[in-house]
């Protein structure tokens, strides 16, 4: 069990949470929710001792073991299986079956288990770290957005696995379906406080909505009363006969605490910038083949074309080349053979995954956006920052300190900087909080051009599949 009392954390003058208190009791599986940048990951880092806090107490029992997925992708063993076995607790070092079971659940084939960990795709390397954590049987498992590096099949497996987790768990994810399938409790960071309830996210959000509605009603009622009393005072102040009454009203008024209006939490709202395109065909792909050096081809002889208003969803398990395909289309990779031919009027906006390091840590948000503008108009860059919820000084934050969702918003800001007629979007809803993901989907919907989308977000509806089943078969 861990307990926080009056825990406070801020960065400069920006308060993340203010004297928060909570307990994680034995066997509780707690979902941690909250908007992008509200401090979920920071709270994890504080619990893990990787980050200081400004005040309060965090009590952790002696010998209490934490499990979290390491960010570093450094491996020492010759095979993935052996590397996974390093996670086993000291008294279970020979429990190979356990590691095999978990690796299989996470989508590793027998061949991958026997291969060197270094040659796994980035996503699988993170999964290997997840496997090591899961087999290590910690007292408290801390998982920060695991669905970002899993595909639909392994997400379902992890969901089942976690719903049987016998000890404590805190799970961060913006995927409510996944969360609700796992947790016994929901804890949220909201308006710099935390609240924890027994039950799922639906109950949590309903409770907040109800409390805030009551708060607002009370505030309006109080305000009306206050005005009445004030009117009474002004009206009768001069009347000697009522002096006592007036004095007592003044006293009550000054004693009564004013219910403050809740600050409005701004939602993301933006649209993509469309460059008109009058022809029919935007792009054609002919006999495209690609393989990374020394590996099996990811696809060969791929043929398809994209028309001006197509909505295309690329599906398939991790590691089968979805990101690679988008990179080929964006010209970031060169195919072994075949070609990608654009119409001369085509203009492409490419949203790369946040883990691709397309942003420079030392830049500010405004500088990154300005870089994409080409003409370097700083005021225009600041306006885009504002639309992406980086208002005022927030636009001067360095990329290095941004949360996952904030980075995703910067990348979106870079995409909307220029007019385009084809969007290539690689898992754009990853990291985004619920409200922002909805705003993004609305923007995609309203976009007049073509869209090619890689996503495992089931909310993204596909209106048009890539021509013919041959392509889909190949990428599956
Ligand atoms: N060293 C730092 N200096 C200044 N601000 C920082 C620093 N580290 C983090 N922040 C800010 O603290 C806030 C909280 O970040 P955190 O990563 O905890 O958010 P989060 O709730 O996990 O968000 P997300 O849902 O996007 O992952 C962010 O606004 C981030 O920019
Ligand atoms: Mg985070």
Image (cartoon, grey):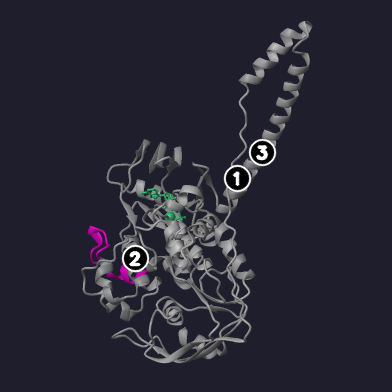
Distance from Cα at disc 1 to Cα at disc 3? 12 Å
Q: Is mark 2 within 8 Å of ligand 2?
A: no
Report x, y in % for residue 61: 32, 42
Highlighted range, magenta = 86-103
Is label 1 in contact with label 3 (beta carbons under 8 Å)? Answer: no
- The residue furthest top is 240
Is label 2 in contact with label 1 (beta carbons under 8 Å)? Answer: no
Regarding residue 161, the answer to whether it shows in the image is no
Q: Is residue 92 magenta?
A: yes
- The residue labelled by disc 1 is 264
Q: Earlier in the sequence, mark 1 or mark 3?
A: 3
- The residue labelled by disc 3 is 216
- The residue labelled by disc 2 is 131
Q: Nearer the viewer, residue 28 or 35?
A: 35
Res. 71 image quadrant: bottom left
Which secondary structure lies at badge 3?
A: helix
């Amino acid at each position: 069990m861990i307990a926080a009392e009056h825990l406070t954390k801020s960065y400069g003058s920006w308060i993340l949470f203010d004297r928060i208190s909570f307990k994680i009791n034995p066997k509780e599986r707690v979902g941690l929710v909250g908007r992008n940048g509200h401090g979920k990951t920071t709270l994890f880092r504080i619990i893990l001792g990787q980050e200081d806090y400004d005040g309060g107490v965090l009590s952790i029992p002696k010998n209490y073991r934490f499990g979290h997925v390491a960010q570093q992708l450094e491996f020492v063993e010759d095979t993935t299986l052996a590397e996974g076995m390093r996670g086993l607790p000291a008294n279970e070092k020979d429990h190979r079956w356990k590691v095999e079971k978990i690796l299989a659940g996470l989508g590793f084939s027998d061949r991958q288990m026997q291969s060197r960990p270094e040659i796994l795709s980035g996503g699988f390397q993170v999964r290997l770290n997840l496997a090591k954590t899961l087999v290590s049987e910690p007292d408290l498992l801390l998982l920060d957005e695991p669905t970002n590096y899993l595909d639909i099949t392994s997400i379902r497996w992890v969901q089942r696995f976690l719903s049987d987790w016998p000890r404590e768990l805190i799970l961060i994810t913006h995927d409510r379906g996944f969360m609700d399938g796992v947790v016994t409790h929901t804890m949220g960071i909201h308006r710099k406080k935390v609240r924890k309830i027994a039950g799922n996210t639906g109950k949590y959000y309903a409770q907040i909505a109800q409390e805030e509605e009551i708060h607002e009603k009370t505030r309006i009622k109080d305000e009306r009363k206050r005005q009445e009393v004030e009117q009474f005072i002004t009206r009768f102040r001069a009347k000697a006969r009522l002096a006592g009454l007036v004095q007592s009203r003044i006293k009550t008024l000054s004693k009564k605490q004013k219910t403050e209006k809740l600050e409005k939490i701004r939602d993301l709202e933006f649209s993509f910038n469309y460059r008109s395109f009058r022809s029919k065909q935007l792009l054609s792909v002919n006999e495209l083949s690609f393989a990374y050096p020394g590996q099996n081809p990811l696809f060969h002889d791929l043929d398809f074309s994209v028309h001006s208003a197509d909505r295309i969803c690329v599906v398939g398990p991790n590691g089968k080349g979805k990101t690679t395909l988008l990179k080929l289309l964006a010209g970031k990779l060169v195919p072994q053979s075949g070609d990608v031919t654009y119409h001369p009027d085509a203009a492409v906006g490419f949203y790369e995954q946040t883990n691709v390091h397309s942003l420079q840590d030392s830049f500010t948000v405004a500088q990154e956006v300005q870089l994409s503008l080409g003409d370097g108009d700083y005021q225009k860059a600041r306006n885009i920052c504002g639309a992406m919820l980086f208002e005022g000084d927030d636009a001067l934050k360095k990329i290095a300190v941004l949360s996952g969702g904030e980075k995703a918003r910067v990348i979106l800001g870079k995409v909307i900087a220029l007019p385009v007629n084809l969007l290539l979007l690689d898992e754009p809803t990853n990291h985004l909080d619920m409200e922002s993901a909805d705003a993004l989907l609305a923007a995609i919907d309203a976009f007049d051009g073509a869209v090619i989308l890689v996503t495992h977000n089931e909310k993204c509806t596909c209106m048009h599949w890539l021509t013919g089943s041959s392509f889909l078969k190949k990428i599956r």
